Image (cartoon, rainbow, N blue to C red):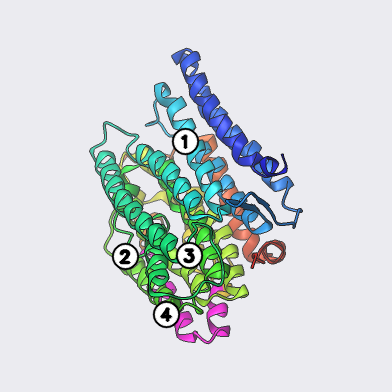
Amino acid sequence: MQGWSLLTPELVLSGLALAAMTLDLLLPRRRSRWLYHFAWLSSAAVLALVAASLGDGAARGAGTLWIADSFGRFFKLMVLLTASLCLLLGLDYDALPERHAGTYASLMLLTTAGLMFLISATDLLLIFVSLELVSISSFVLAGFERGNRKSNEGAMKYFLFGAFSSAIFVFGLSLYYGAAGTTRLVPALPGSPMLLLALLLIFLGLAFKASIAPMHFWVPDAYEGAPTPVTTFFSIAPKLATFAALMRLFGTVFPAAHYGLQSLLVGLAVLTMTIGNFTAFFQDDVKRLLAYSSVAQAGYLMIGLAVGTPRGSEGVMMYGFVYVAMNLGAFAVAQAVGQAEGSYDLSAFDGLASRSLGLALAMVFCLLSLAGLPPLAGFMGKLYLFSSAVESGHWWLAVFGVVNSVASVYFYFRVAHRMFFRAPREGAGPLPVGPYVYGGIALAVVGVLLFGVRPEPLIAGVRAAAPLLP
């Protein structure tokens, strides 16, 4: 029974997802919109359950597939926080119809449960099953606006790339089984060519979910076409959960430096942040711009994974936490503007400061935090990541990170320039903002400012949760 008790948050969330499906069949259509409220309340309840267990520093295994430790709880907290806030944003998103409320609610909860399983998995079979649960649910969510051709196109590209990455992962899993004789993540295996190829293929399969180059090509189209609350969720939760799995794999079980993979991870970190930032220069759609920004953020997180030091792990966790706030805030403002203007083009942001100064300031705070400018929270996260590279002797990796951060200021300021230095279109009045979107933006801005000015509580939490199992 102890093993099952460790799975309580995941089982509760999965049960609530099934309950949403059942209620969708029983409730009359005119009341089915309450299932959107049911979904975010469910995620918030499980979030409280995980938060209550953060003080338990013990690491216990549930059989041979699963482990419950402080590291996993920290990442689950971030995933659940993202899911709760994105479900709140969905309450003010007009394109989500009432008749599909149960489907949307259950898919979001199942995706979140799959990410939680992924975070704590210690067996490649469970990792694969978790990825498939997340992927299948995500394919449907990406194409949820069935009348939108861009949504259909993005979902199809997401599906094709997802199928391709799953095949790569399974091939790597089979080679791993041939080299190790088990699918469990067993440390201290000899570095045979078969094992190294298996680890490379497994990494590529996971890189798809984290939008790490060169497995990032699905990102701009899927993010542009998906409903904006879903896009917000895609840009944060799967990325963080996948990095948790990668940190277990290459941080403790198969240290990248020990198996000669550190140079590869370092190169992919540079490639990912550079492609993300410099491709964003040419985007005129804010959702696509933020999509490439999300790719660049994966590159920054890769720095902590590549250096393979305790400080690097702390940097990933700290930056991941503040990334939830700053990326969610930026997408929430984009949702408010996009819904009001019927477009996510940069021109839709013209004169936003004169129409809604609060929204414009919130967007600027979040974008500058993504760029890593002080005294905002993104600066502290990047400081941890870049200092971990310097301490490990990879000072040039920190230089690449700083150069990319400086370059990203250009396309972030393109949005700021539109909001503050362009006149709004003729006849444009005050911008309407729904209460749930407003609340999400307010929480995001508080996080961006609070953890930038006073990061000590976050640093203490990260240091308590960062140690991994050997």
Question: Disc 2 or disc 4, which is closer to the eye?
Answer: 4
N-term-proximal mark, 1 vs 2: 1
User: In the figure, is residue 209 to the left or right of 357?
Assistant: left
**Gap between marks 4 and 3 measured at Cα:** 24 Å
User: In the figure, is residue 405 to the left or right of 468?
Assistant: left
**Three-letter residue code for mark 3:** Ala
Question: Disc 3 or disc 1, which is closer to the eye?
Answer: 3
Q: Which residue is mark 4?
A: 263
The verdict on residue 251 being magenta is no
Q: Which residue is mark 1?
A: 90
Measuring from the top left, give residue 371's x and y in whole percent.
46, 67
**Three-letter residue code for mark 4:** Ser
- Whether the residues at callouts 2 and 4 have beta carbons within 8 Å, the answer is no
- Whether the residues at callouts 3 and 1 have beta carbons within 8 Å, the answer is no
- Secondary structure of the residue carrying tag 2 is loop
Q: Which residue is mark 3?
A: 180
Question: Disc 3 or disc 2, which is closer to the eye?
Answer: 3
**Three-letter residue code for mark 2:** Pro
- Whether the residues at callouts 4 and 1 have beta carbons within 8 Å, the answer is no
Q: Nearer the viewer, residue 409 or 184?
A: 184
**Gap between marks 1 and 2 measured at Cα:** 31 Å
**Gap between marks 3 and 1 measured at Cα:** 45 Å
N-term-proximal mark, 2 vs 4: 2
Q: Which residue is mark 2?
A: 214
N-term-proximal mark, 3 vs 2: 3
**Disc 1 crowd, CA 10 A, few/some/many (<14, 14-19, 20+):** many
Give the magenta range.
385-413
The verdict on residue 401 being magenta is yes
Which residue is painted at 35% across and 72% down in the image?
271
**Disc 4 crowd, CA 10 A, few/some/many (<14, 14-19, 20+):** few
- Whether the residues at callouts 4 and 3 have beta carbons within 8 Å, the answer is no
- Secondary structure of the residue carrying tag 3 is helix
